[in-house]
Amino acid sequence: MSKVASAAGKAIDWASVASKLKLDAATASAIANFRSRHAQAVAKLGTLREQATTVDFATYRSVLANKEIVNRIESSMKSFKPVKIDLNSQLKAINAFEAKASEGAKKNVELVKAELQNLSATLKNIEQARPTEEITIEDMKQAVPEIEKIVETMVTKGKWVIPGYREKFGDLSIM
Amino acid sequence: MSSKLFCLRSFPSVQRTAWQRLVLPSTRKFSLTPTTFDKTPSGRIPPDQKAANIISSVPSTSLLTKSGVLTVTAAALATAISKGIYVVNDESIVVASFLGLVGVFGTLGRKAYNEWSDKTIAKIGGIMQAARNDHTSAIRERIDQVASLQEVESVTQALFHTSKETARMEAEIFELEQRVALAKEAKSVLDSWVHHEANVRAEQQERLVEDVLARVNSKVSTQKFQQDALNESLGEIEKVLASA
């Protein structure tokens, strides 16, 4: 039961993880394969746990006249040692890889949080700014000092028309 | 200095006026209407209110200064006329008529000009506000995009947890597969032994039955057995006839 609870706590929203983290097609496909492999392992383990791993030797001993064969098979069953996969080395490799991946993920999270802070500050500045009607030319000069230099250059070169201004703001001439 | 020159030379007077209205809309004076017109039912302003309006239109701060300015202006004008510095002639009449006409046209065109000016101000203000709103929307959208990336650390840990769990499961599957296979093989061997012993027992029974039948048949074929059977049959018949 605790394993089930642990799995529930660690449940991944498989359907939306690819779109949420902006993964590319190859990575999304790899995650889908990983998910299917995990699901197959869970299903196969459930199936195998339902099957019997022992034999009712008492029944066979009462039925069979040849008791020796039952004894031999029983002792063979008891002395059987299944071949085991080297799980420790696999877990060690996974842990090493997890350390690197977690480090990369932490860096990404820090970058994301820094960008979120910048965006939030910008949004706050925009929301707290004065209405556009109250902004004066002097304020614009203070905010963007290059405007004054640009204007001086344009006046020196005799340029009186700002590109795109007429199309965007219209013309204040009556005629 | 060059900026002022640029402003003076680049804008016609109408544009300059409109721009100043854009920059400082609160300084508009054409849209101000005297509010005392509605208070007199007969339509004429009382003399004291008229005098107060004249005094308040003088650009100064205190009542004394305003009255002083008016008095000095009137006195200077009277002195100029009396000493011959300023002579009222036909040119003065033309100037007075022109100013009067300008006032009339200003009064007539005030409403239309105010409407046009308000519309222009609203248009440009709307353009700027729309630009600001677009910028806000773009930033909000970017925040929503980036916010979902914050889960990358938890998702990474969950994926690795699942990976370890999968490895353990596969190891257990490998072991269980061997145990299940061994149990199945042992069961099949024992079942085959059970089948074998049943076959042996059936064969023995069959052989015993055949042996018994053979001995019975050989005994039935002998002459002595047949004679004894015949005598016994005749004995039975005689018994039956005697009892009748």
Image (cartoon, coloured by chain):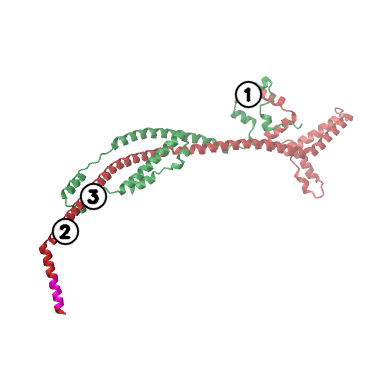
Chain colours: A green, B red
Subunit under mark 2: B
Residue B218 relative to residue A84: left or right? left
Horizontal and vertical percent for residue A31? 42, 37
Whether residue B238 is in magenta: the answer is: yes
CB under 8 Å between callouts 2 and 3?
no
Secondary structure category for the residue under label 2: helix
Horizontal and vertical percent for residue A65? 16, 52
As drawn, A141 above or below B174: above
Q: Rounded to the nearest whole Å, what is the CA distance between mark 1 and mark 3?
A: 100 Å
* Disc number placed over residue B191 in the picture, else none: 3
* Disc number placed over residue B213 in the picture, else none: 2
Subunit under mark 3: B
Secondary structure category for the residue under label 1: helix
As drawn, B200 above or below B51: below
Residue A70 relative to residue A6: left or right? left
> Which is nearer the eye, B158 or B77?
B158
Residue B219 relative to residue B171: left or right? left
Q: Mark 1: which amino acid?
A: Ile
Same chain letter for marks 2 and 3: yes
Q: Rounded to the nearest whole Å, what is the CA distance between mark 2 and mark 3?
A: 33 Å
Asked where in the image residue B100 lies, by quadrant, the reply is top right
Label 1 belongs to which residue?
A150
Horizontal and vertical percent for residue B64? 74, 38
State which tag comes first along the sequence, 2 or 3.
3
Same chain letter for marks 2 and 1: no
Q: Which residues are magenta?
A: B233-241
> Which is nearer the eye, A16 or B211?
B211
Horizontal and vertical percent for residue B145? 51, 37
Q: Mark 3: which amino acid?
A: Asp
* Disc number placed over residue B116 in the picture, else none: none
Asked where in the image residue B208 lies, by quadrant, the reply is bottom left
